[in-house]
Image (spheres, rainbow, N blue to C red):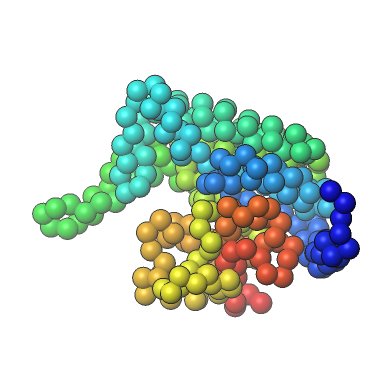
Amino acid sequence: MPLTRDSALDIAKVLSESLPYIQQFSGKTLVIKYGGNAMTDLSLQAGFARDIVLMKTIGINPIVVHGGGPQIGQMLDKLGIESEFINGMRVTDSRTMDVVEMVLGGQVNKGIVNLINNAGGKAIGLTGKDSGFIQAKKLFVKTQIEQDGTPEAIDIGHVGEVESVDTSVLKMLENSDFIPVIAPIGVDQQGNSYNINADLVAGKVAEAVSAEKLMLLTNIAGVQNKAGEVLTGLSTTEVDNLIADGTIYGGMLPKISCALSAVNAGVVSAHIVDGRVPHATLLEIFTDEGVGTLITNANSH
């Protein structure tokens, strides 16, 4: 379909508006947590892959960290292994961990690598076990005991938290044409594997590489106030207040605390982005409006 004059002018306006952002972020590293609808809807998948390739082409260094909870659940169902959750975390015995590694490190990771390659990029898939770059330790979940209310630490198996990130392999890829795609699996000193929350991994990777931005793609429009309006720009202090007064709660809390931790550790800004919007990552980075909530440390500016 031929371009009308108006649509051509719209395209020119968008390209022109993006120039200062391209200049600002060229040479910088962006860590993007990829999950939710953006990961399962075919047209959103293709758009995401093109966005990542475009970033790399104009000199930005994207690092993709992905989840895969629903895909793990489907495979466990197929294999007749029951899923049990405590405080929203999957109890992961050795058998379940084998499936997690197969799905996250294999099927999901290679699927995303393939998408980016098909869009003209050069993606390379990693898990934290590659060169042991994500050192993990076992995560104990605290729950309340009925009688006296003291918290009890519960062992939920091969579920971990990030102890440290060795950035050497990421630095090597950054200085090349390759785009790292990371599955959130860590390893401990003894070589045990751990399934780690992908938001947490993205946050810790962003901190370790001193990223310019951490972007968490979600299935919501952004952080909302009590009236349901999206809060587009927040300082870390404002976020703390929203947590304290109960505006931010439930499933949003881990995402927000991961964003806060990253910004407090020197990442310039964190973004909670609506991954259901086509090309959400590009819109958030390269337009004045954006499509989510931007969190910055007001004290650092």
Q: Residue at x 50, y 66 (%)?
A: 223
Front residue of this view, candidates 54 and 297: 54
- The residue closer to the viewer here, 186 or 1, is 1
Residue 61 appears left or right of 93: right
Using the rendered image of the protein, determine whether residue 210 is visible from the camera's viewpoint.
no
Q: Quadrant of residue 277?
A: bottom right
Q: Residue 207, position in %: x, y?
A: 60, 56
Tell me if I can see residue 220 in this picture: yes
Q: Is 185 situated left or right of 179 in this image?
A: left
Q: Residue furthest left?
A: 147
Give residue 74's position: percent from left, percent from top.
43, 31
Residue 298 on image: x %, y %: 60, 77
Residue drawn 46% across the image and 38% down it: 70
Q: Is residue 46 above or below residue 226?
A: above
For residue 288, side relative to residue 71 (left or right): right
Relative placement, left or right, of 67 versus 155 is: right
Residue at the spot 37% in from the left edge and 39% down from the top edge: 90
Quadrant of the rendering where the C terminus is positioned: bottom right
Please tell me how many numbered marks the rendered image carries. Answer: 0
In the depicted view, which residue is nearer to us: 79 or 277? 277
The residue sitting at 56% across, 40% down in the picture is 40
Determine whether 123 is above or below 23 in the image: above
**In the displayed structure, would residue 59 be above or below residue 160?**
below
Residue extending farthest to the top is 79
Picture quadrant where residue 273 is located: bottom right
Residue 55 x, y percent position in the rendering? 77, 51
